[in-house]
Image (cartoon, rainbow, N blue to C red):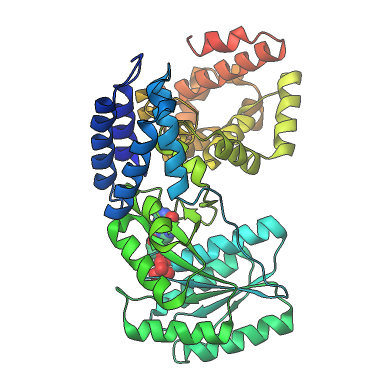
């Protein structure tokens, strides 16, 4: 997970202050030295770090901290506020053109995640506003790029305009825009070519596309894993194209996170979205305050709640409640529940959004391997419909049959049936209003 190192170091630094009734200027100085190192190690831009430390130090040696009875909390609050500020304070949403279509031009280096992010944005726009977007394939240098965009278009049921790899990208964009006008598409996303590094030819082509397309948004896609380089790339593209925002990708990876903290301060342009996975739903609006909270291990309940709302199917939830009340929760529901939870993303990432859980060692084993779910499903699918509804039918010989039917070892089958029974018992007790039962089941 991104920011792990930074997050750990900052929290360790602050924990030294915890419990101190009073702190002195020299405590603050010592702490700022550690924060500075932590930021530089996380690949935060040097000037950004310098200014950040200066501001925090000035505020931290002021009376609001030194005279406070809870100096540690005060310092953390200041760091939280200043981290939020350097990332841009507020979430900045996409601009919309006065008349359709709103044109969004995706630019960036090769491999940054342009094509993927174009797909994610299309999905986001459809979900947010039932948009009818058109994708334009203007990356003619990487043959696979057109195919990749077409696959994405098919997945999302969105048309893709392309003229193969022999045409001129500027012409493709012109013709694609005409098609969007004719078909009254409300959004157009242009996937442009990338290079391994910024060069004049690329910038020239992008400038010409910009001139023709008059985009409302030029979103620069940058790979957060490239650290300091991501910030330089952002500076370069911004100088040439005057971008309107940034999509910072691969924050799900083991990135140190410096780009997220530097780009806004260096370019003056907001990070609008972050990419948190390869799948098309792995896009989040970038909220500086929530990100600062995550970095400081203060959790991110807002994102967690939004995720739960988005991913949880209300109809299914109502159905589950009914089944719990009627005591008809069966193996099919068991599989559904596990799938629902898994849809929200890796369990350790989800748990980290809960305040106080960020560095909890228990999270190390919280993840359910997607394969485990597949194995459980295989066992359930080997059951007869009667067995799925009634675990009591599963006597030893039937269990053996399930093991050979699903290709899973017998102890695994037994374990699963036991888990299911526990879940069923817990649900019965819960619906009878005995919530203590749940705690007993959890071993508390
Ligand atoms: P492009 O050359 O800029 O169009 O880059 P692509 O969209 O082809 O992406 C390059 C690689 O990065 C692909 O393997 C993507 O699946 C992957 N990728 C893109 N965004 C993310 C992200 O947010 N997280 C992760 N883990 N991978 C990503």
Q: How many marks?
A: 0
**What residue is drawn where x is 67% and y is 14%?**
430
**Residue 257 image position (x, y, % from top left):** 35, 48
Ligand 1 falls in which quarter?
A: bottom left
Is 273 on the left or on the right of 193, as rendered? right
Q: Position of residue 64 (x, y in %)?
A: 44, 27
In the image, what residue occupies the spot 66% across and 8% down?
A: 434
Q: Compared to 277, does 11 lie above or below? A: above
Residue 366 visible? no
From the viewer's perspective, tell me whether residue 427 is left or right of residue 414: right
Q: Position of residue 375 (x, y in %)?
A: 46, 36
Residue 107, can we see it?
A: yes
Is 73 in front, or is 375? Answer: 73
**Relative height, residue 171 to residue 151 (above, below):** below
Residue situated in front as seen by the camera: 60 or 397: 60
Which residue shows up at 56% across the image and 87% down it? Answer: 212
20 sits to left or right of 182: left
Q: Could you say which quadrant of the image residue 217 lies in?
A: bottom right
Q: Is residue 115 above or below residue 164?
A: above
State the image quarter where residue 433 is shown. Answer: top right
For the N terminus, the quadrant is: top left
221 vs 419: above or below = below
Q: Where in the figure is residue 27, as x and y percent of width and height?
A: 26, 25
Q: Nearer the viewer, residue 204 or 398?
A: 204
């Amino acid at each position: 997970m991104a920011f792990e190192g930074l997050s750990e170091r900052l929290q360790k630094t602050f924990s030294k202050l915890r419990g101190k009734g009073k702190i002195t200027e020299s405590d603050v100085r010592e702490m700022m030295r550690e924060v500075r190192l932590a930021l530089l190690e996380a690949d935060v831009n040097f000037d950004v770090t310098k200014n950040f430390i200066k501001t925090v130090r000035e505020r931290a040696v002021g009376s609001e901290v030194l005279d406070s009875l809870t100096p540690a909390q005060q310092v953390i609050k200041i760091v939280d506020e200043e981290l939020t500020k350097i990332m841009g304070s507020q979430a900045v949403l996409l601009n919309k053109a006065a008349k359709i279509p709103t044109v969004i031009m995706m630019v960036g280096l090769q491999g940054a995640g342009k094509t993927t992010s174009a797909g994610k944005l299309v999905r986001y726009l459809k979900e947010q506003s039932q948009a009818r977007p058109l994708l334009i394939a203007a990356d003619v240098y990487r043959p696979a790029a057109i195919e990749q965009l077409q696959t994405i278009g098919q997945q999302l049921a969105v048309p893709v305009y392309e003229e193969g790899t022999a045409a001129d990208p500027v012409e493709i964009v012109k013709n694609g825009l005409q098609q969007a006008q004719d078909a009254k598409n409300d959004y157009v996303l242009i996937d442009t070519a990338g290079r391994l590094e910024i060069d004049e030819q690329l910038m020239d082509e992008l400038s010409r596309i910009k001139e023709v397309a008059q985009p409302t948004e030029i979103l620069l896609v940058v790979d957060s894993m490239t650290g300091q380089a991501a910030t330089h790339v952002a500076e370069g593209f911004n100088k040439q194209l005057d971008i309107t925002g940034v999509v910072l990708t691969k924050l799900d990876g083991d990135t140190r996170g410096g780009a997220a903290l530097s780009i806004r301060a260096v370019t003056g342009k907001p990070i609008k979205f972050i990419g948190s996975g390869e799948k098309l739903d792995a896009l989040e609006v970038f909220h500086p305050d929530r990100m600062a909270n995550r970095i400081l291990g203060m959790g991110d309940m807002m994102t967690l709640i939004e995720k739960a709302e988005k991913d949880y199917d209300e109809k299914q939830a109502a159905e589950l409640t009914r089944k719990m009340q009627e005591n008809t929760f069966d193996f099919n529901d068991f599989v559904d529940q596990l799938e629902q939870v898994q849809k929200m993303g890796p369990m350790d990432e989800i748990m980290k959004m809960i305040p106080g859980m960020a560095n909890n060692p228990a999270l190390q084993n919280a993840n359910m391997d997607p394969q485990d779910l597949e194995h459980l499903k295989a066992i359930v699918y080997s059951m007869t419909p009667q067995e799925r509804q009634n675990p009591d039918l599963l006597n030893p010989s039937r269990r053996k049959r399930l093991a050979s039917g699903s290709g899973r070892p017998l102890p695994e089958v037994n374990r699963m049936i036991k888990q299911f029974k526990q879940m069923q018992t817990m649900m019965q007790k819960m619906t009878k209003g005995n919530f203590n039962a749940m705690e007993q089941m959890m071993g508390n």
